[in-house]
Image (cartoon, rainbow, N blue to C red):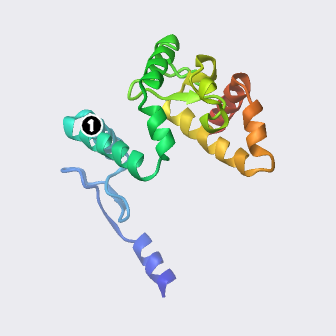
């Protein structure tokens, strides 16, 4: 019965949702290909404007605060809110000229300073060492974090992570980006 319904809905057609456009398209689409791109661009522009608005910034700050309170461990919250970390973070961000050290994109939306050797595997001194820190864009940081999680689940994963250097991470992140 469900396959019959699915086949029926695939055979139903309607006009494009753009006024004065009479192109016939499948019912599961809203606009013809010519207008779809136009509406997608408009949606992306509005989304970017919202993110930059005061309300968007306030909601983002509220989510970050909630994350700190509910998901991040108290030791990490204390570390990332310390004056020493903020000073080192700002130094590394300016040293790297606000550029992702993996893909070369300019980092604009937020300062993501990543520990090459994960902070949980470092001593307190090494966690603030600028040679263990680099600036990453959101996408590269996300990929690196996911790879760290996969490696840490392997046998002796933390030992492996403690010995991976900047050159290895750069190579792997660039390869991952080219694959996608």
Q: Quick one: which residue is furthest to the bottom in this view?
A: 1
Q: What residue did someone put label 1 on?
A: 57
Tell me if 122 is positioned left or right of 158 in this view.
left
| Residue ID at (46%, 76%) | 6
Residue at 44% in and 18% down: 87
Residue 27, quarter of the rendered image: bottom left
The one of 131 and 83 positioned closer to us in this rendering: 83
Q: The C terminus appears in which quarter of the rendering?
A: top right
Camera sees residue 163: yes
Density class for disc 1 (Cα within 10 Å; few <14, some 14-19, many ≥20) is: few
Residue 178 lies, in percent from the top left, at 65, 33
Q: Is residue 173 left or right of residue 27?
A: right
- In the orientation shown, which residue stands out farthest toward the right? 155
Residue at the (66%, 38%) spot, across then down: 179
Measuring from the top left, give residue 20's x and y in whole percent: 19, 50
Q: Nearer the viewer, residue 154 or 109?
A: 154
Q: Is residue 157 left or right of residue 49?
A: right
Q: Is residue 98 above or below residue 112?
A: above
Res 98 visible: no
Judge whether 141 appears above or below 96 on screen.
below
User: Is 62 situated left or right of 3 in this image?
Assistant: left
Q: Position of residue 174 (x, y in %)?
A: 66, 29
Please tell me which residue lies in front, 131 or 60.
131
The quarter holding residue 134 reads: top right
């Amino acid at each position: 019965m469900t396959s019959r319904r699915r086949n029926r809905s695939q055979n139903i057609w309607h006009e494009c949702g753009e006024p004065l456009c009479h192109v016939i398209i499948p019912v599961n689409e809203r606009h013809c290909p010519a207008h779809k791109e136009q509406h997608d661009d408009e949606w992306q522009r509005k989304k970017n404007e919202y993110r930059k608005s005061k309300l968007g910034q306030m909601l983002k700050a509220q989510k970050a605060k909630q994350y700190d309170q509910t998901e991040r461990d108290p030791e990490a919250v204390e570390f990332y809110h310390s004056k020493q970390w903020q000073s080192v973070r700002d130094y590394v961000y300016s040293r790297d000229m606000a550029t992702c050290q993996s893909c070369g994109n300019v980092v604009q939306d937020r300062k993501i300073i990543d520990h090459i050797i994960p902070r949980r595997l470092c001593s307190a001194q090494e966690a603030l060492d600028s040679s263990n820190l680099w600036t990453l864009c959101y996408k590269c940081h996300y990929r690196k974090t996911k790879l760290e999680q996969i490696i840490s689940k392997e046998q002796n994963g933390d030992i492996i992570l403690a010995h991976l250097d900047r050159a290895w991470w750069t190579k792997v992140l660039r390869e991952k980006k080219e694959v996608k």
